[in-house]
Amino acid sequence: EATFGLSEINFKLFPGGSVSKSLANLLRPRDALWYGMLGRPFGGKIAAQIGLINKSVPAAELLNETMTVARELAQKDPWALKATKEGYRFSLEMSWEAAMSYSSAKEMELVLRQGDAWRTEGILSLIHI
């Protein structure tokens, strides 16, 4: 039931600041310009289809789904989550070679911070003997 929109154009403005950068990172150019230039509102299903949001659920299911995702994220290693977010964000602005070097350094940082936990607690926990 949520309504989204880039209404700035309707007020003789444009979706500036972090909105323009976010649109460029999240949406295909066609969708970003369509909604940015027309200023039309759109619902959750379209927001999910164009990649503005990850998932659309009915309002009655929103709290349950949010808590399910929150519990799942809470089970993840916080340092691995932080590295995942930073690796993604920083790689957007890096060359391939720089991104590979950054990723390798970040992986070594996690191994140093966590010891052998990625093997003994991570991978090993997935093996069902």
Image: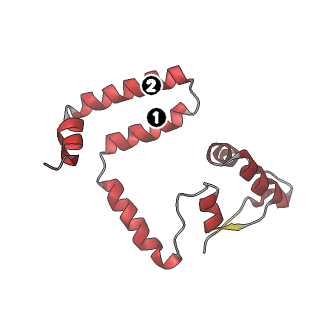
Mark 1, residue position: 87
Q: Residue at x 79, y 51 (%)?
A: 14
Q: Describe the element under mark 1 as helix, strand or loop.
A: helix
Q: Tag 1: Cα neighbours inside 10 Å, few (<14), some, or many (≥20)?
A: some
Q: Residue at x 38, y 67 (%)?
A: 67
- Residue 127 spot, x, y in % from top left: 19, 46
Q: Residue furthest right?
A: 12
State the residue in front, 127 or 92.
127
* Image-quadrant location for residue 111: top left
In the rendered image of this protein, does residue 115 appear above or below residue 43?
above
Describe residue 82's horizontal placement relative to residue 125 as left or right. Answer: right
Describe residue 101's horizontal placement relative to residue 117 as left or right. Answer: right
Q: Describe the element under mark 2 as helix, strand or loop.
A: helix
- Residue 57 spot, x, y in % from top left: 52, 71
C-alpha span from label 1 to label 2: 8 Å
Q: Residue furthest front?
A: 129
Find out whether the residues at labels 1 and 2 contact each other: C-beta distance under 8 Å.
yes
State the residue in front, 44 or 17.
44
Q: Tag 2: Cα neighbours inside 10 Å, few (<14), some, or many (≥20)?
A: some
Q: Residue furthest bottom?
A: 60
Amino acid type indicated by mark 2: Tyr
| Quarter of the image with the N terminus in it | bottom right
In the rendered image of this protein, does residue 49 appear above or below residue 20?
below
- Residue 114 spot, x, y in % from top left: 23, 34
Q: Residue furthest left?
A: 129
Earlier sequence position, callout 1 versus callout 2: 1
Q: Residue at x 22, y 47 (%)?
A: 126
Res 102 label = 2
Describe residue 92's horizontal placement relative to residue 36 as left or right. Answer: left
Amino acid type indicated by mark 1: Gly
